[in-house]
């Protein structure tokens, strides 16, 4: 298949980015996670549509004690540039059935083209296991009073560790993956590939901008004071992605989650054509809309009710139930 210049450049850039990411990622994973010692305890969730499975595993230590891990296995999108290789290079094709002009096959690609993206949380806490466990979900409509009386005390007592965010901001982890940084302590941020994206293809492009300021927990804390920061993220984020990946700003979905999993303000950048997890209307708030809302009313997010989904077993859901708000 002939390769156009844009495709070629994209492939070369994606390969360069992947190569740059590998020594760090590979070394860390190999050193940190003993896959051979993992035993699978249960399947937390499985998705035929996303071709992904979420596992609860345990790693048995030398004295027999088990440490919990979450392992996510996920088949990745095809890389257009490698399809000829996939079809030709040492690929085995086994006939499954044939009928008239129709036939189906099992295709066994070579090792380097049969990667399964693997994400590991190790050691995993009970909260991580809950996060990935398939559960019944309910919509909550949270007023500002609910936020102050229920959600905020809950966040202050419960939130996930955000050490990984500080590691990125302090260049203690993923430093070689940074795509763009505005170092201003007040209005600056770091843009890195999200760990949901393996950077091999642009179809599922996913980056996150992490702000340098540490006291902004979520959308609920934002006021007009934060407009310069938010505008920097929107404009510089788009510019950096266009420059590095040749994807136009008009082809990006740029949004915040409410509720987020990690209460340190961050913004998601995903490919518009990619149906990323968490991009549904009950969770995603477009950054451009957030900016407009704050420009209209500095206290917008301290006034209006916000809707989000919670799983039935989540502690926050129980708090809303106890308060008679579900
Ligand atoms: P969120 O809205 O707080 O929650 O987003 P979600 O995980 O339920 O979407 C946090 C984002 O940070 C997600 O898109 C994660 O995939 C991403 N993320 C989480 N961790 C622990 C890391 C990490 O260590 N490195 C990177 N690069 N991204 C991460």
Image (cartoon, rainbow, N blue to C red):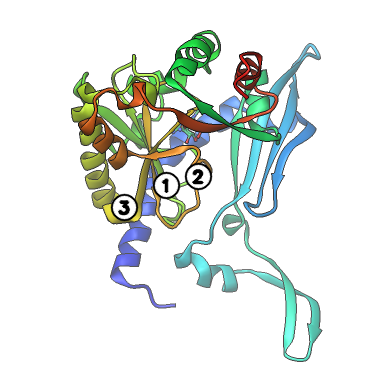
Label placed on residue 18: 1
Taking 323 as reference, is 171 left or right? left
Residue 142 higher or lower than 46, as above or below: above
Q: Residue at label 3?
A: 245
Sequence order check: which comes first, mark 3 or mark 2?
A: 3
Residue count near mark 1 (Cα–Cα under 10 Å), binned few <14, some 14–19, many ≥20 = some
Q: Can residue 171 be seen in the rendering of this structure? A: no
Give the quarter of the figure containing the N terminus: bottom left
Spatial separation of the CA atoms under disc 1 and disc 2: 29 Å
Question: Which one is earlier in the sequence, the residue at label 1 or at label 3?
Answer: 1
Q: Which mark is residue 280?
A: 2
Residue 219 image point, x, y percent: 37, 26
Classed neighbour count for the residue bearing mark 3: other residues with Cα under 10 Å, few (<14), some (14–19), many (≥20): some
Percent coordinates x, y for residue 283 in the rendering: 48, 37
> Does dot 3 land on a helix, a strand or a loop?
helix
Residue 279 vs residue 45, the one in the foreground = 279
Query: At which x and y percent is residue 169?
Result: 33, 22
Q: Are marks 3 and 2 in contact (CB under 8 Å)?
A: no
- Picture coordinates of residue 42, whole percent (x, y): 79, 33
């Amino acid at each position: 298949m002939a390769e156009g210049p844009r495709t070629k450049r994209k492939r070369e850039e994606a390969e360069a980015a992947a190569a740059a990411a590998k020594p760090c990622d590979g070394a860390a994973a190999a050193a940190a996670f003993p896959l051979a010692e993992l035993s699978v305890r249960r399947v937390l969730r499985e998705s035929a549509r996303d071709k992904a499975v979420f596992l609860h595993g345990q790693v048995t230590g030398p004295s027999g004690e088990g440490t919990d891990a979450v392992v996510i296995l996920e088949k990745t999108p095809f890389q257009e540039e490698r399809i000829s290789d996939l079809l030709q290079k040492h690929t085995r094709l086994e006939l499954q059935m044939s009928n008239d002009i129709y036939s189906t096959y099992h295709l066994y690609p070579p090792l380097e083209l049969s990667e399964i993206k693997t994400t590991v949380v190790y050691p995993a806490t009970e909260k991580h296991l809950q996060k990935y466990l398939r559960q019944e979900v309910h919509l909550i409509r949270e007023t500002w009073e609910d936020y102050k009386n229920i959600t905020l005390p809950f966040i202050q007592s419960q939130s996930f560790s955000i050490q990984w965010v500080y590691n990125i901001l302090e260049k203690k982890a993923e430093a070689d993956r940074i795509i763009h940084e505005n170092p201003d302590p007040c209005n600056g941020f770091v843009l890195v590939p999200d760990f949901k994206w393996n950077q091999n293809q642009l179809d599922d492009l996913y980056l996150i901008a992490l702000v340098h300021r540490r006291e902004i927990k979520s959308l609920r804390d934002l006021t007009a004071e934060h407009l310069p920061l938010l505008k920097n993220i929107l404009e510089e984020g788009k510019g950096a992605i266009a420059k590095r990946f040749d994807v136009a700003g008009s082809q990006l979905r740029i949004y915040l989650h409410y509720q987020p999993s990690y209460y340190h303000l961050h913004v998601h950048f995903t490919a518009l054509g990619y149906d990323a997890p968490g991009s549904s209307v009950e969770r995603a708030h477009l950054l451009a809309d957030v900016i407009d809302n704050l420009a209209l009313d500095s206290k917008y997010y301290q006034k209006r009710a916000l809707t989000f989904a919670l799983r039935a077993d989540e502690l926050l859901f129980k708090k809303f139930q106890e308060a008679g708000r579900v």
